[in-house]
Amino acid sequence: MNELTGRKIMKKELPENINLSEALHFPAMLVEREQACCQRCGSVHPVAAVEMAPHHYYCPACLQLGRVDSKEVFYHRPENQGPAREVVFEWSGELTAGQQTVSDWLQKIAVEKRKGMIWAVTGAGKTEMLFETVHALLSRGARIGLASPRVDVCLELYPRLKAVFPKEDIMLLHGEAEAPYRYTPFVLCTTHQLLRFYQAFDLLIIDEVDAFPYVNEPVLQYAAEQAVKRTSALIYLTATPTKQLLGQVDKKILEMIVLPARYHRRKLPIPQLKSCFRWRKQLEEKRLPKELVDCIKSLMEKNNVLLFCPSIVVLNKIYQLIVAQLPNISAASVHSKDEKRSEKVLQMREKKFRLFLTTTILERGVTFEQVSVIVIGSEHSVFSESVLVQIAGRVDRKKDFTSGEVWFLHDGKTKPMRQAVKQIKKMNALAEKRGLVDELCLLSTANNQSSINQ
C-alpha cells in the first residue's frame, strides 16, 4: 500500500494484484452544471468540449501524465507523521552570514508550517541554504518534497543531495525516469510529478518558481497546493520573483526573505548594453556582425564565452558562420532539440570549447567556470527581464574571480533590458548596505560598469 501513501493514483497506474480494500477512493472527475472538473489537476472544462461518448468525459489539461476520465477512480492512503530517526548529514561547508540568516528563517517557517519565499540572487547558494532545514525535518520524521520545473535542475541537484545525505533514499521523479515509484521520506521531482501527490509533504520546496513551465501555469500551482498536507510549509525559491508572487507578499499571503549577495561577497556583474545595428540583415547576408566578433575576441582574452541566441534558427546561422569564418575558435552549440545536449553541456563544463552557443535553455540551473556572457539580439521578446537577469547570473558564480563580463548586443534598447540592469544594480546596492560585499571584492566589477548610453 506504500504506493498510495500521500498519492492519488488510478488503478491502471498501480502494480497488478495490489490490495485496494483499505484505500480511500474518490471520483477522478466531478461533473455538475455542464462542467467537468478534474480531481488531479483542478482544471474545469465545459462538458461539451471534453465529451468522449455520452456522459463520458476526460481532462485534456493533464493528458501527458495519462488520461483521467469520468469512469476512473483515484485511490489514496493518508500520510502519517514518521518516527524521529537519525539522518546522516555529511557537509563540510560553511554558510556565510547572509546564507545563515536565510537558513535560520527557513527552519522557523518550516517548523511553524507557514508559506514563504526566498528571493536570493543567482549564485547565492540556495541549495546549501536548504541543507540544515532538510536535515532537521527528516530527523523529526517529516516527509519532504523538492520540486523544480526543469528536469535539468533535478538531475543536477540529485548527486549534490546524495552527497550530503548519503544514507537517505531519495526518489527522483521526472517524465524520463525509468525506475518505478517507491515510497521515500525525501522526494526530488519535476513540478509535473506533483500532480500524482495528495497531502503528502510536511515541507514542499519549489525551486525556480518563476521558470517555465511552472510560471503562469495554474495546473502546476494547483498541484503544489494539493501535494502538501493541510498543515505544512510551502516554500518558493527564486532569483527573479514574478509580480504575482510579490503581490502575495504585499497582501501578507506569503512571507519573504531577500538575500542580495553571493557567497563569495562580490557584487553581481552589471550587463553592458551595446548597439548591434541590423544584425539580422547581416546574418542573412552571411556576415557576422563586427560588434559580435569584436566582443567575442575581447572576452576570450580572459574567459570562455557563452553566447545566447533568441532562437534555434539564429543560433544555427551564427554557428555556421563562426565555423566558416572563425575556424581557430573551438565552438559548439546546443538547444532544446539537440539529442546530445547533456553531453555537450558536460564538455563545456570540462572546458572543451572556448565558445558555446545556446538558446534560453541554459538561462538557469547550470554553472560553468571562467565564462563571460553575450546575448545577441537582446531586444527580442524571448529575453524578458527575468531571463536577462538569469543569463547575467551565469557569470562569476565561483569563488575564484575571473573578470567575467556580461554584454547585451541589441538593435534597439527595450524595457526588459533596462529593468534587468536596474534590478541587478538594486541588489548590489542592497548587498552593500547590509555589509554583504567586501571592498576588496569590488575589483570583480571594475570591468563590468554599465554602458547604458552607448
Image (tube, rainbow, N blue to C red):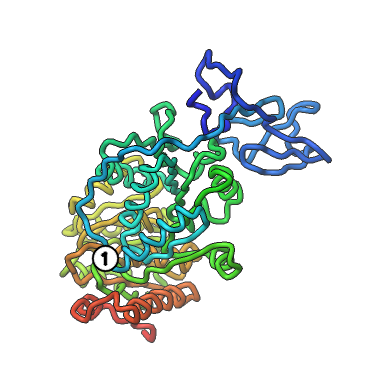
Question: Farthest front residue?
Answer: 84
Q: Amino acid at mark 1?
A: Thr
Q: Is residue 248 left or right of residue 402?
A: right
Q: Residues within 10 Å of mark 1 (few under 14, many from 20)?
A: some
Quarter of the view holding residue 306? bottom left
Q: Is residue 203 left or right of residue 43?
A: left
Label 1 SS: loop
- Number of marks in the rendered image: 1
Residue 330 rendering spot, x and y as whole percentages: 19, 55
Residue 323 rendering spot, x and y as whole percentages: 25, 55
Residue 422 visible to an observer of this rendering: yes
Q: Residue sitting at 51 percent across and 30 percent down?
A: 5
Q: Is residue 238 left or right of residue 261?
A: right
Residue 20 rendering spot, x and y as whole percentages: 58, 19
Along the line of sight, the residue nearer the viewer: 263 or 49: 263
Q: Report the residue marked by disc 1.
A: 96
Question: Farthest top residue?
Answer: 17
Residue 281 visible to an observer of this rendering: no
Q: Residue sitting at 67 percent across and 30 percent down?
A: 26
Along the line of sight, the residue nearer the viewer: 296 or 436: 436
Q: Residue sitting at 33 percent across and 47 percent down?
A: 135
Along the line of sight, the residue nearer the viewer: 76 or 406: 76
Rendered view: 229 above or below 422: above
Q: Quadrant of the C terminus?
A: bottom left
